[in-house]
Structure formats: C-alpha cells, structure tokens
Image: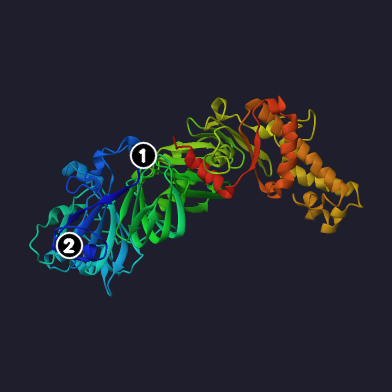
Amino acid sequence: MKIQKLIPECKDYVWGGNKLKEAYGKISEKTLVAESWELSFHKDGLTKTENGLALTTQLTKEELGSNLSGFEFFPVLNKFIDAKQNLSVQVHPSDAYALKNENSFGKTEMWYIVEAEEGAGIYLGFNRDVTSEEYKRAIEQNKLTELLNFYKVKAGECYFIPAGTVHAIGAGCLIYEIQQNSNLTYRVYDYGRGRELHIEKALTVSNLNKHENITLKGEALGVSKYFTVTKLLCAQKRDLQTDGKTFHCVTVVKGEGKIEGLLVKKGDSLFVPANYGKYTLTGDMEVIMTQIRKYYLGIDLGGTFIKGGIVDDAGNIILQDSTPTEREKGGAAVAQNIASLCKKLLKQANMTESDVVGIGMGSPGMIDSKTGEVVYSNNLAWEHFSLADEVQKHISLPVKVANDANVAALGETKFGCGKNYNNTVMFTLGTGVGGGIIIDGKLFEGNRSAGAEIGHSVIVAGGEQCSCGRRGCLEAYASATALIRDTKRAMLAHKDSKMWEIGDIDSVTGKTAFDYKDSDIYAKEVVDNYIQKIGVGLTNAANVFRPEAIILGGGVCAQGDNLVKPLQEYLNKELYAGEKGPQVKILIATLGNSAGLLGAAALLIK
C-alpha cells in the first residue's frame, strides 16, 4: 500500500465549535465539528481513505506492523478536539476494571495543545490527596473543580492522562488527542447540560491521590504499550523510515509541505504502512507522529552505581537514571535498589508495569542466564546469588540477566556500529579485556553462560601474568592496564625517551605511547607491540567464528585510525584463506556508556 491521506469521521457534540471546519480543512455537513477522528478503527467512527473505503478494511498484517500482533484489536485512536465550551469533568477506567465490568478496554490518553485562547485551560487530577467521601460530596455540591488542578495551557504543551485520572478540557482549547481505542467515559459533572452521569462508577475507578503532571524531554511526548507519540519539526527536509514493526500516523499541526510528494497542510493526517520504508517530509511544518512500539527496562549493574533506562524496540532510550548499588548491604538490598529504580523510571515516563515487556540486566561476573543466577562475581562479592528471583520479589516483571560484557556486545550489534551485521565479536579494551560474541543476531554464551571469555585466550605460552591467574592471556597484553605497564617499562629502560616529557612515571596513561609514537622510537615499539598482540587475539577470534565484523570498545579506541588501520592490515594479512574467504571489518564502538543499558534491554527483544 502507498501512503494514504486519511478522511476523518466528524462528531457534532454540543460543546464543539467550527475551527476544525474553517481552519483545519475538515469537510462535514454538521453545523458543529467538535471532534474529527483522524485515525480510528472504532465502530463508532471509522476513518476512511480517499477511495471512500474504511482504512481498517484495506490493511494487511505487514502494513500494520509486527508490533500489533499481540493486540486483540487496533490499539489507538487519534482525534482533533475543538472545545468552544467546557467539556464534562470525567474519568476513564483502567483495563482491568473495564474488561471485568464493561466488556471493553479502559482508556489512557494524552493531549497535545494545538491552539489555546487567552486564559484557556484544563483540569487534570486532584490538587491534593482526597477521600472518597470528599470526592462524592464535592460532586453533590457542584464543587468538584475546586479539588482539581487547573492548568492554563498554551500551544505546544503536552499532558498525559493515565486511566483513573479525573480531567476536563476547558473552553478555548483545540487539542490533538491520542488515546487507547476505547470510547468508554464516566462523566461526573457536565455543567447542567442534562447528559447522563456515571458517578458511582467514577467513584470506583478514580485515582484519589494528588496528581503530579509529568512531561518527557526530547521529541517523545507520550509512551505506552498502546501508543508512542513524538513531535517532529521539519524545516525544509526531514527523512523518516518505517521498520516493519509499526505503521506511522503523521498529522500536521502547523505549517504545510509535502510528504512523499503529497501536499499537506495543518489538519491533515496520513497513514504510512509499516513496510513502506524510507519517506521524506519537505516544507516548513510541525507534525505529530503516532507509532506502536514495545518497551523494555534496561539495567546496567555496576559495583558503585546501577544505571537504568526505558528503551524501545528501535533502540531509543526514552529516559534514564541511576542509583547507588550499595553492594556492602548485600545482594537482597541491591536487588531491591534495582526494583526501586525500575519503578522510579516507570513513574517518570507515566508508565505502568504493564507497559513494558520486562527487565533486561547486565551484571559483572559469571552468569547463568537461563536461571538469572550470578554464579560468581568478584566485583559484587556474590556466589550463587539468584538475582532475577530477588528482583522479582519487588516488581512483577520478567527478568533476564547476562554478563555485562556480553550485554554490551549485544547492544553494539543491535543498535550501534554493528547494527547492519548479524555476526560480530566485540573486544572491550579496558582495565581488562572483555567482550562478547553474537551469532545470527543472538548472544553466544556457552555452557551455563560461562563462555565467551575472549580476553582469557592465551596468545603467549608462559607469558605475562594475567589477573585470572594464568599466564600469557590476551588481557595481559591488550588491556589498557597492559599498555600502561609496557609504556612505563620502556621509559624506565630508556631514560632518553621523549616520553619523559610528561613528567614522572606516575603520569603515564594509555595515551602516552600513542602521543609519542611518531617522535620517539621507544614509544613506537610499545605501540607496535601492543597492536601486534591485539592483532593476534582478533585474528584468532576471526578464524574461529568468522564474523562479519569485529567491534572494538574501551578508552584506547579513542585513537581511532591510529589503532584501527594497522589492526585491519594485520587482520587482512593473517586471516585464514586471506582474500579467498569472507573478509572481517574492524569497527569502533559508538554507543559508549549506553551500550550496556541498550544491550540489557535487547536481551528481551525477539
């Protein structure tokens, strides 16, 4: 299917105005157009395309996207709302209540303020904790709005309304609403217009706690399992792409231009099939884009801090935060800290546990990823600690745990420099040498997840002492620790080395030999030897696994071409069968400190 311009279903509710007809191009025989349902598969108002047929009848599963396969029906409904008068004060139930009592799903929604007259505003949530008795009494006395937060609004603002939040749109607001595909509303106050009220149901489903308005930073406006909404600015040109997982619904809220050659202006909505691929926006406009994405909690567990984030299935970090590990308090306390961080992240994103697939986690040490047990971790002083089970005592989500180096390799392969490859090996050149192996897009961990210790393959029999207790391991030659050791040895052996210009021996870093390699023969010897030893390790991995790419991470990689060029030359020369076999490209990792967080989330992405 090509990109389709959408023809909305218009509604003439009593509180509506005529801006949608006069300024936003909505065509209707109705005198008032209170709402235009831009993207709707709901029986109460089906969106059509220019051929006059309902959009829902024209789409294949591939055009909707694979992320919709888990829904019983189309999950989202988008509409413009023109409030000439105040809308009723109302509340929507949660899925749990609605499914049990109404044979329907509940409704979480969000509002993007397109226009707002001077002084216009919205009511959203209680301004303090209230009791059920106070709530009921305020309704009976027509004083409910005194208990609610009132926000004066302006164009460009966004408000998220979780199910159970009492709310109302005030006169003078023109809003673009994105909601669950439900038309279930409980009115509690309607300004005496005589419409049915649903007070007893509202009393049952309303959240009586003080409401805190939370907004996201960046382009993301609202995220949930039912919808992902972003605001995109197009100044002259902007390229976008669907990925097969979700369609795009693109609605112009300001300006005009073209989308793949189709003329668009404010008020227009287009449907881009999930399998369409690349498309281009041109002109000067603001658009609201709706997708259906899946979300994951990613946790990067360190000895000092726990880093966490909410990640979507395209590798976007929606938000992130951290908390102290407090390993000295024991494993149970660490697990509780992890769960608390996850809950904090969900709250910051206006999400619930049901909005995310699960928790992926990278932990230092030997991990049994099938059971979520940390078999041994020197950094955390754990042996046979059931990390996944302990975390699940505090949060009801699936938990998947893997070694932190393996997880970083998965992150770089899924979302970083290796995203165009299915088979990679990653070497992290830090204090030690860690890494991971990805085969056919999946993490290879070995028996009971104890394999892939690529830093502990011996490259010099009886060689330098390694931190693991053996001699001659790659780590003993290719780590930043080894590079600093060899630089110091060269300086102490050669007092005429220019490297002494840095001051004293304690000033040596992993950069020192590289900084002087072009002017000092001893520095060059250190660098050449370092590259040769890494080259041996890379060649061994390339000959065993024959990946499409080898990814290098760690601080030493800041040397860029000074490191990669000679390594690529060495690998090309030493690779088994040389040019006769498939070549292996050396890449520098691009995700930095985000690799672990993204890779942890990727543990749950199928």
Camera-nearest residue between 363 and 509: 509
Camera-nearest residue between 459 and 232: 232
**Front: mark 1 or 2:** 1
Instruction: Looking at the image, tell me whether mark 1 or mark 2 is earlier in sequence order.
Output: 1
Camera-nearest residue between 58 and 305: 58
Pointer 1: what residue?
A: 65
Secondary structure of residue under mark 2: loop
- Work out which quarter of the rendered image holds the N terminus and state it: top left
Q: In this picture, is 410 found above or below 24?
A: above
Q: Residue pushed farthest bottom?
A: 118
Pointer 2: what residue?
A: 88
Relative image position of residue 31 (x, y in whole percent): 13, 63
Q: Quadrant of residue 157?
A: bottom left
The answer to whether residue 528 is left or right of residue 392 is: right
Amino acid carrying label 2: it is Ser
Q: How many marks?
A: 2
Residues at marks 1 and 2 touching, judged by CB atoms closer than 8 Å: no
Relative image position of residue 74 (x, y in whole percent): 27, 42
The answer to whether residue 65 is left or right of residue 596 is: left
Relative image position of residue 55 (x, y in whole percent): 25, 43
Callout 2: few (<14), some (14-19), or many (20+) C-alpha neighbours within 10 Å?
many
- Work out which quarter of the rendered image holds the C terminus and state it: top left
Callout 1: few (<14), some (14-19), or many (20+) C-alpha neighbours within 10 Å?
many
The answer to whether residue 310 is left or right of residue 352 is: right
Q: Is residue 244 visible?
A: yes
Q: Is residue 330 visible?
A: no
Amino acid carrying label 1: it is Gly
**Label number found at residue 515:** none
Secondary structure of residue under mark 1: loop
Relative image position of residue 569 (x, y in whole percent): 74, 37
Q: In this picture, is 175 found above or below 515?
A: below
